[in-house]
Image (tube, rainbow, N blue to C red):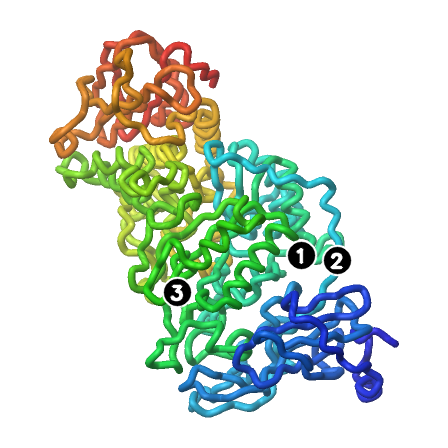
Amino acid sequence: MESLKSQTPAKAAAARSALPDVQPGQPWPLGSSFDGKGVNFAIFSAHAQAMEVCVFDPSGQHEITRFRLPAHTADVWHGYLPGAQPGLMYGLRAHGAWRPDRGHRFDASKLLLDPYARDIVGQFEWRDEHFAGDRLHPRHMDTRDNAALALKARVTFDHFDWGGDQAPRIPLADSVFYECHVKGFSKLNEEVPPTLRGTYAGLAHPASISHLQRLGVTAVSLLPVHYAVSEERLVGMGLINYWGYNTLGFFSVDPRLASGAGGLSPRDEFRSMVKALHAAGLEVLLDVVYNHTAESGEDGPNISFRGLDNASYYRLPPDALDYYDNYSGCGNTLDIRQPRVLQMVMDSLRYWVGEMHVDGFRFDLAPVLGRTDQGFDRNSAFFTAVAQDPVLSRVKMIAEPWDLGPGGYQTGGFPRGWLEWNDHFRDGMRGFWVQTAAANGAPLPDNTRADMAQRLCGSSDMYQPRNRAPAESVNYVVSHDGFTLRDLVSYNQRHNEANGEDNRDGHSHNLNFNCGAEGPTDDPQINALRGRLQRALLATTLLAQGTPLICAGDELGHTQGGNNNPYCQDNPSTWIDWAAADDDLVAFTARVIALRRQALPFANHWYSGVADALGLHDLAWLRGSGITLEGDSWRDPKYRALGCLIGKPGRAKAPLLLLVNGGNTTDPFLLPAGVWRCVLDSSHPQGLSTWQGQGEVVFPLPANSLVLLAAAGSGISI
């Protein structure tokens, strides 16, 4: 029999009559799967009354045939089509009740995408035909057929030659995360061939990898690469969702980020990227969005989940089933309480580890995953499932520990073994460095120094009481979401006009300071202060106790023109401008990462501050006078400087002394006894210093700077 995927519309009628009977098949695995002789379909829907599969020609425009899945097992509709081959293109139609008031939004006139699609075909266009509810009268159905416009799934069955690929498995103590956007990273890099720029292949190019290796980072943390759809509002303004936090296909790579070079499919280009990064010793972490889907709120379209089983896939208010719990801020919230929805998330995660070889995940709005009927629970089904999973329990799991629902702020509240983005670190370090500079000698809040010290030492107030390791705090001062590092110290106000929301969007509490001029300036003093602050923030992030994360471009001096919410800006404002790179800042960043690797100033255990039998403290805090910093001295608003004497570093063989001065003038600091050598001075554009000498002398601690001194015998060679 001619394969189904090759049939033309002219043969459609004959093909329908020639099709073999659809067999019952199996209720697993979910989605479509080829076994060498045919294709099994298994689709979850607890409330549908029937499920149809519609088969299309290769163009996706002409339906060849359709058939109902003949079997129904434990809420899974399934059937087996003998003779069907990989490449077959299909969509689904779910039959059931149109009762939004009861949570059901079935409409068989809408062709739906298989949630388990590995390969999604077509370009989504916002058209009224996708909406099951009439757009003027939402409680009434719009029964126009959307098949010609709908996205389709394509059956896959492929083999990728991994060539002995091995996961780097970098220990947390050695990890330095580098957050980047696949397109934005290489789009303007002239060392990458034009056809590869801004793609998976561009990130895998030797020029890209060379930069990452020069820096010394250990993992790229990629903004979403799942198949995503831009919101209708953005498309109407001529914009797109550049960041990609609007997922539709949890098993499919975003084809917009593929070059197609060498004839590779987007899936295989992504795999080739992972393989190349692994060969360079770099891990690949994915930012994933399992908190909501691209189908928006109650006025949104039936693209996939809503039409297949709205009441199962989404959280609906019990007293208003025609609405949605909106804990994501994007119109809907996936209901991980439902076993089959939980299964989909787990299957997706395992797919990306097992088939795509990624090394971990950063979960957007992660509390959604742990929400039960009573709110967030670190012992919920999702966390339990991950903990016992033989695949997922071995990779890095990182939470953005807040969502928009009740009790949604959960920093410090995730299970042991999970990492968390630590916004306390971000705000504490911005407060100490940026706001101290802005105060220019004026009194600061009483807790500024104490909070900085707390964050420098792993945020022990949040993690130690729960028996969690310091490395579970992901320390960052800048991420994709907000100002770039350069803009943080170049703007007093956000400049988000290009986003089309009259500059109302984006964070308003940024702890930023323009250092004396709004935006670019030729003033050498302002630029010098901006440089000192950028280097101090980078050094603090990279040397602090915990797992550091820096944002791509910050080491190059990247600017977004003051836009602190450029989620919809796919243009040079978000693409890294390699031609304008600050080479000194790159060298500084690489030096600090190398120092972290050699010295590991803080071990991955909690310090006690207690002296041993020889009188050596594992860690002690000092004032500029050299005496111990304790009690009310922490709250003295006049002091901008402090020292951290680390008696037992993580890797250095002798004590380290980390000095910080947040003020705008040089402060004298009396060094402890011993022989000391300065291995880092952030006041220098590249962090260099030649100072060395005896202790018990006054060291001139530069303004707005971090200095790291190593005692004799430390073993630090940098």
**Vertical order, 279 against 93 (above or below):** above
Sequence-wise, the earlier of marks 1 and 3 is 1
Q: Which amino acid type is marked by label 3?
A: Ser
Q: Position of residue 234 (x, y in %)?
A: 46, 69
User: What residue appears at the point 18 percent right and 36 percent down from the top-left corner?
Assistant: 440
Q: Which amino acid type is marked by label 1?
A: Arg
566 or 277: which is nearer to us?
277
Q: Do labels 2 and 1 touch, CB within 8 Å? A: yes
Report the residue marked by disc 1. 267
Sequence-wise, the earlier of marks 3 and 2 is 2
Residue 58 sits in quarter: bottom right
Q: Residues within 10 Å of mark 3 (few under 14, many from 20)?
A: many
- Mark 3: secondary structure: loop
Q: Position of residue 512 (x, y in %)?
A: 28, 46
Residue 546 sits in quarter: top left
- Mark 1: secondary structure: helix
User: What residue appears at the point 37 percent right and 31 percent down from the top-left corner?
Assistant: 605
Q: Residue furthest front?
A: 74
Q: Residues within 10 Å of mark 1 (few under 14, many from 20)?
A: some
Answer left or right for 599 relative to 670.
right
Q: Which amino acid type is marked by label 2?
A: Asp
Sequence-wise, the earlier of marks 2 and 1 is 2
Report the residue marked by disc 3. 328
Report the residue marked by disc 2. 158
Q: Is residue 486 visible?
A: no
Closer mark to the observer between disc 2 and disc 1: 2
